[in-house]
Amino acid sequence: MILNEEQQLFHDAMANFFSEHASIDALRRLREEPSKTGFDREVWANLVELGLAGIVVPEEHGGLSFGWLGLGAIAGASGRHLSPTPLLSHIVLAQELLLNCGSAEQVASHLPALLSGGEVWTVAIDGGRFFQGGDDSVNEVAEGRLTGRKVLVPEGEAADYLLLPVRRTDSRLGVFAVPAEAEGVHIEATRMMDGRQYANISFEEFDTSDGEWLEGNSLERGWELTLNRAMIVLAAEMTGSARELLERTVQFLSEREQFGVKLATFQALQHRCAKLYGELELAESAVLGALSAIDHGESEIAAKASLAKAMANDCFTLVSSEAVQLHGGMGVTDEMDVGLFLKRSRVANQLLGTSDWHRNRFAGLAGF
């Protein structure tokens, strides 16, 4: 669970880039602008040029094969700066779903545009009602027609293509590639409290001849594999945010004085920080274990994915809540970055499964 030399160098380069070009200040600027994308296109193009889009893509497909442990470290660096990028939606969800569910011809046709940054893709999962393996909010209601609605789709407004998991009329899972500008697709952007753009997408008798069904083998397995990997990478981002927030809080307590002494000298506050540190170490261990399991090709990572996401949810919620309290009343003001971490924690908690959902899943996988 230690980065090799190449992974470490790549991580350091990305961390420096996030710090200089995709920091919390960049998030604040995007939040105040009427941007339809929710992220800076130029910044994203530079990240792609650095190789981020191909970090886990096999070399035979033009990727770098740097491994999921390396991507998890970069996601953690992104989380430290609350960097608004389509890393999760484009690189993990869309690219992985294409690789896992598309035919060889479809991968060869579409993947180059994703790796070059020429197109931005996302997966139209229903962020307002998380599901596993497709749901009934969008159906193939008649031959060649789609209808329904997805809400809170990450980067839905910015996407050139939407990958839409659909429970078809014969109960089989289908994955449909939808051009975002196709007739019958209606996209409405919305901004959540974490400052990022999401989209509500409706399909009104959409003609499937305007898109294409992914034709790979074992779509159910490919969908589950993609979801598990996305859960783990999101958990890595969340623990990165929690680590940054804890370090900022300890620094604040070391500088702030009360009754003529530093707050960090109060034993009660030391105990609270020690608890946060312990919970963060546990969560990071679960995330690193899950990332390592992907790299080592373990066939069953669902339990580790749920363990990582549930612990990251709980840890980020705890750290962000405590950080606001330990900063005092000003911790909830918009001028303080602490509040932005708190808001991100609440939104990320709901993405790709809440703690309760993952505990139930974990218990089911364990036979309970």
Image (tube, grey):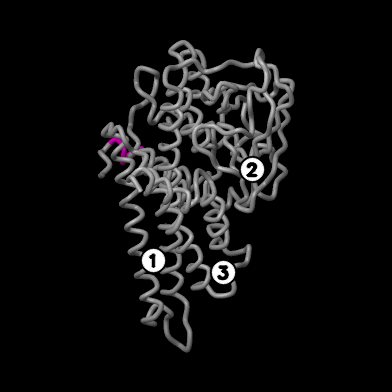
Q: Which residue is mark 1?
A: 276
Element carrying mark 2: strand
User: How far apart are the two marked residues, 2 and 3, measured between alpha carbons?
Assistant: 24 Å
- Picture residue at 63% right of the left edge, 41% below the top: 152
Q: Name the N-terminal-most of marks 2 and 1.
A: 2
Q: Residue flagged by tag 3: what amino acid is it?
A: Gly
Q: Are marks 3 and 1 in contact (CB under 8 Å)?
A: no
- Picture residue at 49% right of the left edge, 62% below the top: 320
Q: Which residues are magenta?
A: 6-10
Q: Which residue is mark 2?
A: 197
Q: Name the N-terminal-most of marks 3 and 1.
A: 1
Element carrying mark 1: helix
Side of 72 relative to 174 (left or right): left
User: How far apart are the two marked residues, 2 and 1, measured between alpha carbons?
Assistant: 30 Å
Which is more toward the observer, 349 or 10? Answer: 349
**Vertical arrangement, residue 306 with respect to residue 317, above or below:** above
Sort mark 1 into few (<14), some (14-19) or many (20+) by Cα contacts within 10 Å.
many
Q: Are marks 2 and 1 in contact (CB under 8 Å)?
A: no
